[in-house]
Structure formats: structure tokens, C-alpha cells
């Protein structure tokens, strides 16, 4: 690992972030997820956060992180519309892995509860994109658990890229397959999100997530809309009642 550390570009090299991402993709094309994670953390020490949904396979990337540094900030979008099971899983998994800096990002509390029915894109923009943007302003980069197999839009996703604000974004699991994820979860005896066993292979906000087949996991997300993404990765009254999966 020492050799890898010595060859890691330091923070100032990321001023030309896009070019740097390109070079990193070449240099670390065959690196493992663990190596990629270490490259990212060493390149932007104290300036990078991991964004996690604490969803169906989030335990993989969070476990990889916990083996390296449990103090790295982990950002979770608490949209106020999540399944109660997801919030419990976040608490349980964080404790299991010993994560010491998990931050729940919440939206404006006055957003109407039925906004997702009236304008789902606006709902995602206000419950997800805006809270994340506010926090990422304090960081020079982020780490995501996205995989190429998940959607057509992610099929060509590089390992290192830049977001719309010029921050480095790192996708250590880009090339992972469902079988690799499952094997990793089993090998490390990681706790599973309780809704996976109940037919939810991909888990987001409760009103916008339905059970789906394992063969097409994202089919249960925004099932009645021609959408694959919430908007985070591209670039207002009502009491919120937590829904449990039926
Ligand atoms: S996934 Fe649904 S409930 Fe969640 S922020 Fe987007 S539209 Fe709103």
C-alpha cells in the first residue's frame, strides 16, 4: 500500500479536477475497490465525504471504508420520506461498523408531505439535491456506491469523475456486479437491509419505492415514471408519517 500512497496526487493536483480524474482512471483502471478508496482518501484528506443511502447493498462500501478510516464523514439524505426500516438499519449498521461521523441531511421541514405526488422532480430537488449541495460545499470530493449495472445512465460511469461543481467524485464499486456484492456481504457477514428479504432489491423513499424482481432491481423506483435517477448525481405543510413497508 505504501507504493500506492507515494504515487497519489495531492490536493492541489485536483484544481484541474477533470484532467486529474482522467489520469486517475488510467492509473487505477485495474485497482481494487479498497485501493480506489484509499487513493480518494489520501488525495483529499479531510476534504472528502462518502454519500450513502443505507440501502440494499450500502453495507459493502461502508464496510470497506470502516476498514480504512471510521472518522470519514458519511452523509445520508434523510428526506423525511424514508422507510422506518431504513432509519433503523442506518442506526444498526453504523453501530456494527463503528462509524463515528454519520450525518443525516434533512430538507426544509415545511415542505408539503404530498410534494412527490404533485411534482416528483421538484420533490427530489428539494429533499435530496439541495440538502446535499449545501453540505458538499464544504468538501472537495465525494464517494458514491453507484454501480454501472444499475441503470442505463450509469452504464459508462467512470471510477473517477467530476460533478457539476468541479468536485472529484469517486465510484469505487463502479465495475461491481450483483454477484460480487452478494459475495462480499456474505463473506463479511454484514447485516442486510430488512426490506431486501421482503422483495425490495433497491430501496429509496417509501412513496416512490415498490417491490421489484432481483433481475431488474431499479424497476421498483419511480415505477410509474420514466425516471432512473433522483437528480443527485447529475446535474413546501404537512405532518410526515413514517411508513413501514407493507
Ligand atoms: S424519491 Fe420520491 S419522496 Fe423521495 S425525494 Fe424523490 S420524489 Fe420525493
Image (tube, rainbow, N blue to C red):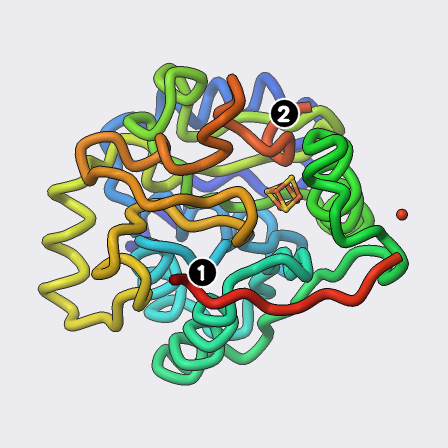
The answer to which of 235 and 225 lies nearer the viewer is 225
Q: Is residue 240 left or right of residue 242?
A: right
Q: Position of residue 227 (x, y in %)?
A: 53, 22
Q: Is residue 100 above or below residue 188?
A: below
Q: Is residue 38 above or below residue 105?
A: above
Q: Position of residue 193 (x, y in %)?
A: 32, 65
Res 212 quadrant in image = top left
Q: Are marks 1 and 2 in contact (CB under 8 Å)?
A: no
Q: Secondary structure at mark 2?
A: loop
- The residue at which mark 2 appears reads as 234
Which quadrant: the C terminus?
bottom left
Q: Residue at x 69, y 23 (%)?
A: 235
Residues at marks 1 and 2, CA–CA distance in whole angstroms: 20 Å
The answer to which of 19 and 148 lies nearer the viewer is 148
- The residue at which mark 1 appears reads as 54
Q: Residue at x 44, y 70 (%)?
A: 85
Ligand 1 located in image quadrant: top right
Q: Which mark is residue 235?
A: none
Dot 2 surroundings within 10 Å: few (below 14), some, or many (20 or more)? few
Q: Give the residue furthest to the front.
A: 246
Q: Residue at x 10, y 64 (%)?
A: 187
Is residue 193 visible in the rendered image? The answer is: yes
Is residue 28 visible in the rendered image? The answer is: no
Q: Position of residue 86 (x, y in %)?
A: 46, 66
Dot 1 surroundings within 10 Å: few (below 14), some, or many (20 or more)? many
Res 67 quadrant in image = bottom left
Which quadrant: the N terminus?
bottom left
Q: Is residue 134 above or below residue 94?
A: above
Amino acid at each position: 500500500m505504501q507504493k500506492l500512497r507515494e504515487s497519489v496526487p495531492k490536493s492541489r493536483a485536483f484544481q484541474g479536477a477533470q484532467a486529474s480524474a482522467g489520469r486517475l482512471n488510467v492509473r487505477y483502471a485495474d485497482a481494487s475497490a479498497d485501493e480506489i478508496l484509499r487513493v480518494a482518501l489520501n488525495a483529499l484528506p479531510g476534504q472528502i465525504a462518502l454519500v450513502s443511502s443505507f440501502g440494499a447493498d450500502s453495507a459493502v462500501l461502508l464496510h470497506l471504508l470502516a476498514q480504512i478510516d471510521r472518522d470519514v464523514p458519511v452523509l445520508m439524505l434523510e428526506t423525511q420520506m424514508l422507510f422506518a426500516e431504513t432509519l433503523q438499519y442506518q442506526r444498526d449498521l453504523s453501530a456494527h461498523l463503528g462509524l463515528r461521523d454519520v450525518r443525516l441531511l434533512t430538507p426544509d421541514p415545511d415542505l408539503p408531505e404530498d410534494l412527490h405526488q404533485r411534482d416528483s422532480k421538484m420533490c427530489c430537488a428539494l429533499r435530496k439535491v439541495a440538502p446535499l449541495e449545501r453540505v458538499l460545499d464544504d468538501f472537495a470530493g465525494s464517494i458514491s456506491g453507484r454501480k454501472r449495472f444499475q441503470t442505463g445512465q450509469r452504464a459508462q460511469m467512470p471510477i473517477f469523475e467530476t460533478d457539476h461543481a468541479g468536485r472529484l467524485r469517486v465510484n469505487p464499486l463502479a465495475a461491481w456486479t450483483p454477484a460480487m456484492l452478494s459475495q462480499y456481504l456474505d463473506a463479511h457477514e454484514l447485516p442486510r437491509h430488512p426490506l431486501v428479504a421482503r422483495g425490495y432489491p433497491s430501496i429509496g423513499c417509501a412513496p416512490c419505492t415498490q417491490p421489484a424482481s432481483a433481475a431488474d432491481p431499479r424497476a421498483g423506483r419511480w415505477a410509474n415514471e420514466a425516471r432512473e435517477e433522483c437528480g443527485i448525481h447529475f446535474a413546501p405543510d404537512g405532518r410526515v408519517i413514517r411508513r413501514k413497508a407493507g
